[in-house]
Image: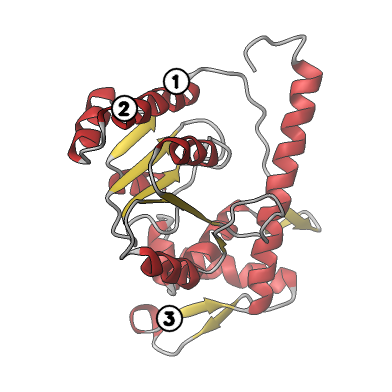
Amino acid sequence: MKIWLISGASSYIGKTTLLNKLAAVLPDVESMKTGHHAKKNHGAANYFISTDDSLRFIDSLKEKSGYLLVESNRLAGIVDADLVIFLDSMEGDRRRDANTLHSHADIILGHRGNPEEWNRQIKKLKLPKKVHEEVLDIFKSQHEFLSKSRVKLKTKIWLGRDGNVVFGEGLARLLDGIDTLGSLSKAAKEEEISYRHAWGDIKRAEERLGFQLLERNIGGKSGGGSQLTPKARDLLAAYFSLKRKAILESDRWFRDLFSGIIDDI
């Protein structure tokens, strides 16, 4: 089984669209996706919230022939993929670990994309000529979409109390990193903040929320580990679900209200 992994610099830049287009041209293909919120009724058949469950699914297919398309940021650098595709954009809510995801990629689409490099990487895979050309066309189409300059609505979601931020994007990414890596220090490094900064953010959030976010193992900064409490996982899933719905709705309102005023949206 040849594994192709798709990651991206932010949300809503076409990772699922790219996966579906590739699934339509690759022979004997399976696909899967990792996420934070409960699976939608019309969503991907192979959808996983748990990293361990997603890795077990991948292991179950390794002896099969064909292709596995994986849409996941958290598995980049963890899964031994035959091709890693990164969708890069300077627009939107760019992830703080975007440069790390970029470093894992064989093919970059969008910002800093190089069509000659795409062709060189695809040649290594020894695809049938027709499939090679179709994959290259898909990459070009996605690259053009990401590179096009458009007016966009900027939407940020955070929870507040008494004028103070209780929970927002930065802490959500930090908790997601802890859930994936099993370590506060590793997650802080991924977010490019100090351990002390990360610890302080979590303590303040716990005080303002009124419940514990982390279950800490003894060992300290270098020797221990951390995992999310069940309530923290529920909070994280609800936050990402709220963010997804808010962005979809606000984008719809933006297009409806501004489409007759601004051309390039």
* Quadrant in which the N terminus appears: bottom left
Position in image of residue 64 (x %, y %)? 33, 61
Residue 160 seen in this snapshot: yes
- In the shown orientation, is residue 61 left or right of residue 16? left
Name the residue carrying label 2: 130
Q: Which residue is located at x 43 percent, y 58 percent?
A: 193
In front of the other: label 1 or label 3? 1
In front of the other: label 2 or label 1? 2
Q: Residue furthest bottom?
A: 218
Residue 157 seen in this snapshot: no
Position in image of residue 96 (x %, y %)? 45, 48
Looking at numbered disc 2 in the image, what kind of residue is underneath it?
A: Lys
Q: Quadrant of residue 81?
A: bottom left
Give the spatial CA distance, label 2 vs label 3: 49 Å
Name the residue carrying label 1: 144
Q: Nearer the viewer, residue 195 or 56?
A: 56
Q: Nearer the viewer, residue 22 or 53?
A: 22
208 to 66, vertically: above or below: below
Label 1 neighbour load within 10 Å: few <14, some 14-19, many 20+: some
Looking at numbered disc 1 in the image, what kind of residue is underneath it?
A: Glu
Q: Quadrant of residue 260?
A: top right
Q: Which residue is located at x 48 percent, y 46 percent?
A: 95
Position in image of residue 69 (x %, y %)? 42, 49
Residue 225's disc number: 3
Position in image of residue 134 (x %, y %)? 37, 27
81 to 128, vertically: above or below: below
